[in-house]
Image: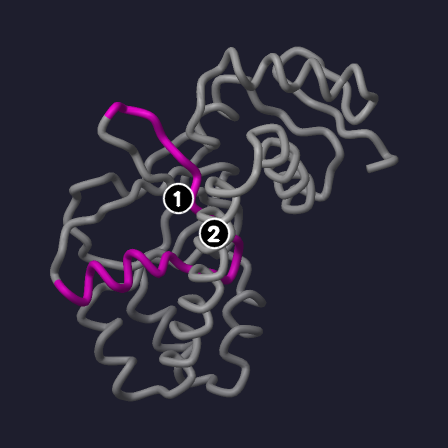
Amino acid sequence: MNANIIFSEFSSSKELTDKLYQNGILKKYHEGDIILDENASIRSIPIVMKGLLRVIRTEEDGREILLYYIKAGESCIMSFLGGMHNEKSIVKAEVEEDSEILFLPMDKVTLFIKEYPEWLDYIFRLYHKRFEELLDIINAIAFKKVDERLLNLLHKKSEISQSKTIVITHEQLANELGTVRVVVSRLLKQLEDSSKLKLGRNKIILSDSI
């Protein structure tokens, strides 16, 4: 477990840090695992200790769109809101990289809100960050072309992984953008022709010049 993650988030309250470890349940997951599905009951909230999750929304026609990533030290604000109001999950959380996740039961989530200002501040900071990310998605869908959204997504993945090489299929990219594979494949070929990236087998290498 990467204890430094929790220590850094709640450095002003060792008591809260200890309570999170005492009441949380640590589990390990592999890439592709689903830790929360749509319409599932929310009995605990996940705090990512190590690895990376992606939160997805599925449309009525079966298409998926990426909403945001959850990195180490972060949690899922949709789980907070749904769990506190005893509602079913409206999103799916999938493991992007092998992860270690600390699950905090909902009764402790609400109790800590009353007892620890640092915990409430943590929730508000997450809410603010996710709200801005969702606004960016709405703005991109409404005003940006798919090629811009594709390149922005690739840059985001590169930034998170700290690598110019992104291991992903065209189908996965299409799902995250809410479009179809043939469109993504065509746009990737255009980006390759303009020397912005290089295509490989199930991987994309971004140019150093962009």
Check whether the beta carbons of the residues at disc 1 and disc 2 lie within 8 A of each other. yes
Using a 10 Å C-alpha cutoff, classify the residue at mark 2 as few (fewer than 14 neighbours), some (14 to 19) or many (20 or more).
many
Q: Is residue 181 left or right of residue 20?
A: right
Q: Which residue is mark 1?
A: 55
Q: Magenta region: which residues?
A: 61-85
Spot occupied by residue 95 in the image (x, y as percentages of width and height):
43, 38
CA separation, marks 1 and 2?
8 Å
Residue 168 vertical position relative to residue 106 in the rendered view, above or below: above
Asked whether 140 falls inside the magenta stretch, the response is no
Mark closest to the chain's N terminus, 1 or 2:
1
| Residue at 87%, 35% in the rendered image | 209
Secondary structure of the residue carrying numbered label 1:
strand
Using a 10 Å C-alpha cutoff, classify the residue at mark 1 as few (fewer than 14 neighbours), some (14 to 19) or many (20 or more).
many
Residue 121 vertical position relative to residue 86 in the rendered view, above or below: below
Spot occupied by residue 90 in the image (x, y as percentages of width and height):
23, 46
Residue 77 vertical position relative to residue 32 in the rendered view, above or below: below
Q: Is residue 130 left or right of residue 5?
A: left
Secondary structure of the residue carrying numbered label 2:
strand
Q: Amino acid at mark 2?
A: Ile
Spot occupied by residue 173 in the image (x, y as percentages of width and height):
52, 26
**Numbered mark located on residue 157 in the image:** none
**Numbered mark located on residue 70 in the image:** 2
Q: Quadrant of residue 208?
A: top right
